[in-house]
Image (cartoon, rainbow, N blue to C red):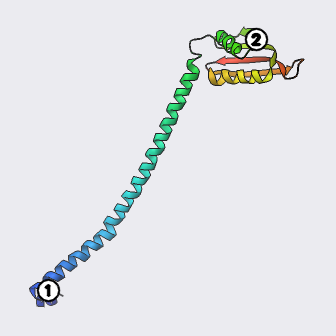
Amino acid sequence: MKEWFNELERREQWIVIVGAATVLLYVLYSSVLAPINDKIGTLQLRNKGAAETLQAIQQGAQEIKALRGASNGSGRGVNLSKMVDQSAAKFNIRVSRFQPSGNNEAQVWLEKVDFNQLIAWLDQMENGYGVAVSNVSMNSANNPGTVNARVRFRKGA
């Protein structure tokens, strides 16, 4: 092979050297660099997708914190008795009896309350004020759609 190369003219030798270098570079690129480039592109796409997902999760977390802050903020610093009285008045619900049990729990008795208003009020207490409804017992009152109820609340749960 060396003899064959030495027999070539100077110009032909340069053509063979340049051709061999070109083929070597092509093989190197196609076997090493192209797969690395493809892998980099794939990883960049995955990274971009993960960054978008992270951003969406962070925005969701901020919304949840804002909603919790807004809902719990209205009940923060207010004792449970006052919170129950004020929120019940907004729903035209009259509390018959209020019995606290500890700092953060209370039992409330309601008589002849519209069922739909009661459910809306309980929803407001849980989702608006952050007060857990731990137990509810109801029985039918004399009028259709009205109930007598006993509710146990737990603040800060």
Residue 22 screen position, x and y as percent? 23, 75
Residue 63 screen position, x and y as percent? 52, 31
Q: Which residue is mark 1?
A: 12
How many numbered markers are drawn?
2
Mark 1 surroundings: few (<14), some (14-19) or many (≥20) residues within 10 A: few
User: From the viewer's perspective, is residue 139 above or below residue 38?
Assistant: above
User: From the viewer's perspective, is residue 39 above or below residue 89?
Assistant: below
User: Judging from the image, what secondary structure is the residue with disc 2 in?
Assistant: loop
Q: Is residue 129 left or right of residue 26?
A: right
Asked which quadrant contains residue 155, the reply is top right
User: From the viewer's perspective, is residue 80 above or below residue 140?
Assistant: above
Residue toward you, 100 or 86: 86
User: Judging from the image, what secondary structure is the residue with disc 1 in?
Assistant: helix
At 84% across and 23% down in the image, what residue appears? Answer: 145
Residue furthest right as drawn: 142
Residue toward you, 137 or 128: 128
Q: Which residue is mark 2?
A: 94
The amino acid at mark 1 is Glu
Asked if residue 157 shows in the view, the reply is no
Mark 2 surroundings: few (<14), some (14-19) or many (≥20) residues within 10 A: some
